Image (cartoon, rainbow, N blue to C red):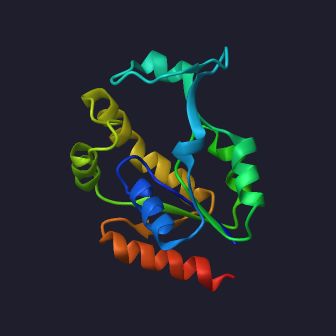
């Protein structure tokens, strides 16, 4: 069983990936195999906090599909967590899809309080994330994703994911 868990920044994808890895489950953090690139030139670039709408229109956060396929082929069961601009190209790699959902206030609090990732802390980036939340969730649901309530404590979410993951062996 291959499971994909996505959500906007601040919903807990990285925390959940770390918890799964700590348990010994095969979890893949999509961010670890992704990079920013110019859509036209395909040149890899870094993201500047507060990048303009024009910059975002011409750049994409890209998951390395070859690496993802290689990782998934090595195991029967895996949970991948994250989001990338080319997500539509890899959704079919998975048997089940979940989208993490929490309130805008929780997202803002989590982004502002995290210490290992500055993405979303710039006011322009945070506004972009918040404007994207509802359309992204609706899009994922239309593609068959089930909602995971990310307001709950991490151990409760982890328990639900593990239950789903292991009940489909």
Relative to residue 31, is residue 92 drawn left or right? right
Q: Nearer the viewer, residue 110 or 139?
A: 110
Quarter that holds the C terminus: bottom right
Q: Is residue 160 above or below residue 100?
A: below
Q: Is residue 79 found left or right of 136 in the rendered image? A: right
- Quarter residue 111 falls in: top left
Closest to the observer: 63 or 145? Answer: 63
Tell me residue 55's x, y (percent).
47, 17
User: Does residue 147 appear in the picture of this structure?
Assistant: no
Q: Residue at x 67, y 20 (%)?
A: 42
What's the residue at 34%, 50% (across, down)? 10
Q: Is residue 1 above or below residue 130?
A: below
Q: Is residue 106 above or below residue 149?
A: above
Spot occupied by residue 141 in the image (x, y as percentages of width and height): 55, 60
Residue shown at 71% from the left, 45% from the top: 67
Q: Is residue 84 left or right of residue 137?
A: right
Q: How many marks?
A: 0
Q: Residue at x 39, y 46 (%)?
A: 9
Q: Is residue 124 visible?
A: yes
- In this view, 105 is above or below 96: above
Residue 6 in percent (x, y) is at: 51, 55
Where is residue 135? Give x, y as percent.
46, 46
Kindly indicate the quadrant of the structure image that contains residue 28. Answer: bottom right
Quarter of the picture containing the N terminus is: bottom right
């Amino acid at each position: 069983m291959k499971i994909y868990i996505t959500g906007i920044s601040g919903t807990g994808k990285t925390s959940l990936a770390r918890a799964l890895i700590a348990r010994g489950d095969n979890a893949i953090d999509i961010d670890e195999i992704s990079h920013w690139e110019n859509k036209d030139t395909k040149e890899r670039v870094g993201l500047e906090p507060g990048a303009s709408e024009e910059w975002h229109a011409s750049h994409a956060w890209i998951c390395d599909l070859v690496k993802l396929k290689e990782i998934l082929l090595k195991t029967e069961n895996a949970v991948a967590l994250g989001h990338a601009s080319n997500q539509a190209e890899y959704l079919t790699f998975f048997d089940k899809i979940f989208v993490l959902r929490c309130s805008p206030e929780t997202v803002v609090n989590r982004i502002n309080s995290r210490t290992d990732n500055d993405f979303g802390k710039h006011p322009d980036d945070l506004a972009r994330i918040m404007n994207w939340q509802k359309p992204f969730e609706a899009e994922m649901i239309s593609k068959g994703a089930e909602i995971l309530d990310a307001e709950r404590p991490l151990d409760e979410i982890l328990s639900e994911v593990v239950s789903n993951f292991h009940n489909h062996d």
